[in-house]
Amino acid sequence: MRYQLEKLSQSTGLVPETEVSLAALIKQVSSLPTGVRPRGLSRPAAAAYIGVSQSLFDEMIRDGRMPKPKLANTRTIWDIVELDAAFDALPTRGVDNPWDASYG
C-alpha cells in the first residue's frame, strides 16, 4: 500500500504530510468514474489537494486564504472550485507585484 501511495503521489504531484490524507483522497476519487474529479473534499483531502498539512490548512481557513467549508447535513466538505480559486489567489514567490505575474 505504501508503494502505491508513493507512486500516486509522484504521478499526481500531491505531497501530503501523512499517508492518511492521501488515502482519504484516493478513497474519494476511486468511487468516481475515470476522469471525473470530486466536487467536494473532506478536510484531509482538501489539505492534501492544495499541498499543505491539515494544521496549515486550518490556519489558512482562519485567516481567509482558504474558503470555509460547505455543510451537507452533518458532513463538512470543501468545494474544489473554491479551493482552486483560493489557491490561484495565493502570492507567487519572487513576484513583487501580483499583477505582474498575471499580465507580464
Image (spheres, rainbow, N blue to C red):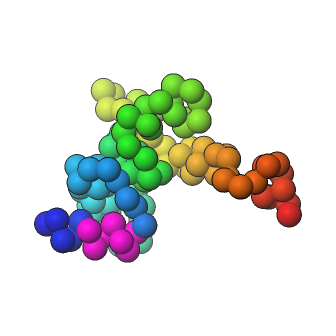
* Residue 28 in sight from this viewpoint: no
Which residue is depicted at the point 75% across and 54% down? 95
Which residue is depicted at the point 29% across and 55% down? 22
Q: Position of residue 103 (x, y in %)?
A: 85, 60
Along the horizontal axis of the image, is 74 left or right of 83?
Answer: left
Number of marks in picture: 0
**Snapshot quadrant of residue 31:** bottom left
Q: Main secondary structure of the magenta part?
A: helix
Q: Position of residue 9 (x, y in %)?
A: 33, 66
Quadrant where the N terminus is found in the figure: bottom left
**Snapshot quadrant of residue 3:** bottom left
Residue projecting furthest to the left: 1
Relative height, residue 70 to residue 94 (above, below): above
Along the horizontal axis of the image, is 71 left or right of 87?
Answer: left
**Frontmost residue, 34 versus 14:** 14
Q: Position of residue 12 (x, y in %)?
A: 40, 69
Question: Which region of the structure is painted magenta?
Answer: 6-12
Relative height, residue 5 to residue 78 (above, below): below
* Residue 94 in sight from this viewpoint: yes
**Frontmost residue, 4 versus 73:** 4
Residue projecting furthest to the front: 94
Judge whether residue 63 is colored magenta. Answer: no
Relative height, residue 32 to residue 34 (above, below): above
Quadrant where the C terminus is found in the figure: bottom right
Along the horizontal axis of the image, is 59 left or right of 20?
Answer: right
**Frontmost residue, 1 versus 93:** 93
**Snapshot quadrant of residue 100:** bottom right
